[in-house]
Image: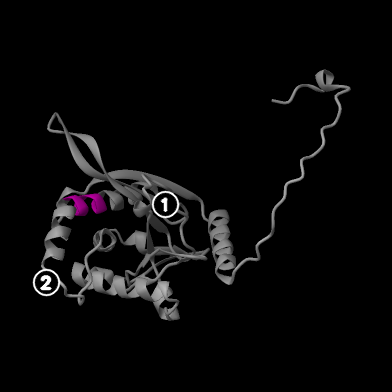
Amino acid sequence: YLKTGAETKGAKPTKMEHLTGRRVPLTPMRKIIASRMAKSKSEAPHFYITTEIDMSKCMAMREEINAERPPGRKDGAKVSYNDFFARAVALSMVENRTINSVWHGDSIEERDEINIGIAVALSDGLIVPVLRNVAQKGLKEIAKDSASLVEKARNNKLTPDEYQGGTFTISNLGTFDIDNFIAIVNPGESAILAIGKIAMRPVVRDGKIEVRPICKVTLSCDHRVLDGAIAGKFLQRVKELMEAGGL
């Protein structure tokens, strides 16, 4: 810590260390990300809630669905855990419509369409392609649409209609061995779900300790639109749907 002025009187000034480096010009994508995230964090008062989801039934259902694909067949996308989350989020939003809203200064707009953005990492940043009308689609259709959008995103072939119009976003860092993280709400939305890795963890079931595949998720919310009880009810329903496995 810094000492008082009396204690440091007469001390010789230290020479500032010269750090070497280089400045990297911002790419257009990085400029957009910086602008949008700074705007969201400065204007929208965020709050965060976290829960743990037992993925046992989802894992079994995913294995069963993907096993239905004949060996060697490339048509028909494999169902991913993001697809399960997209479906659960959409169904929970149907029951909790306030989550599908956005702040407009003097009003709150409740959207009719439930469009889920899926964050996709790129070499120079990230982009969020949008799955449309997710509540009206089954897992296999969601998987097919999601795989197509992700491929287009990685090949820089998304049309504006395919990355605009999202009403909620999912971001998954589980593939990077991340347990849990907190995301920033995208402008034009009121919440984003941050998904961590699935890890075998000890849990208590009926008074006994069992080891289950657990996934930690954190919901970031715009407090201008959402309150804790609304967000909690929404995330609780997502958890129930995921743990039931009957999506």
Q: Nearer the viewer, mark 1 or mark 2?
A: 2
Residue 66 drawn at (x, y percent): 16, 64
Q: Which residue is mark 2?
A: 70
The residue tagged 1 is 220
Residue at image position (42%, 80%) is 157
Left/right of residue 83 with respect to residue 183 in the rendered view: left
Q: Find out whether residue 45 is within the magenta segment.
A: no
Does the rendering let one see residue 138? no
Residue at left 36%, top 71%?
Answer: 150
Q: Percent position (x, y) of residue 93? A: 29, 61
Spatial separation of the CA atoms under disc 1 and disc 2? 40 Å
- Residue type at mark 2 is Pro
Name which residue lies at 34% across and 47% down.
Answer: 229
Disc 1 crowd rating (10 Å Cα; few below 14, some 14-19, many 20+) is many
* Whether residue 64 can be seen here: yes
Q: Quadrant of residue 115?
A: bottom left
Residues at marks 1 and 2 touching, judged by CB atoms closer than 8 Å? no
> Type of residue at label 1?
Ser
Q: Quadrant of residue 142?
A: bottom left
Q: Residue at x 56, y 57 (%)?
A: 43
Q: Which residues are magenta?
A: 237-243
Q: Is residue 31 left or right of residue 152?
A: right
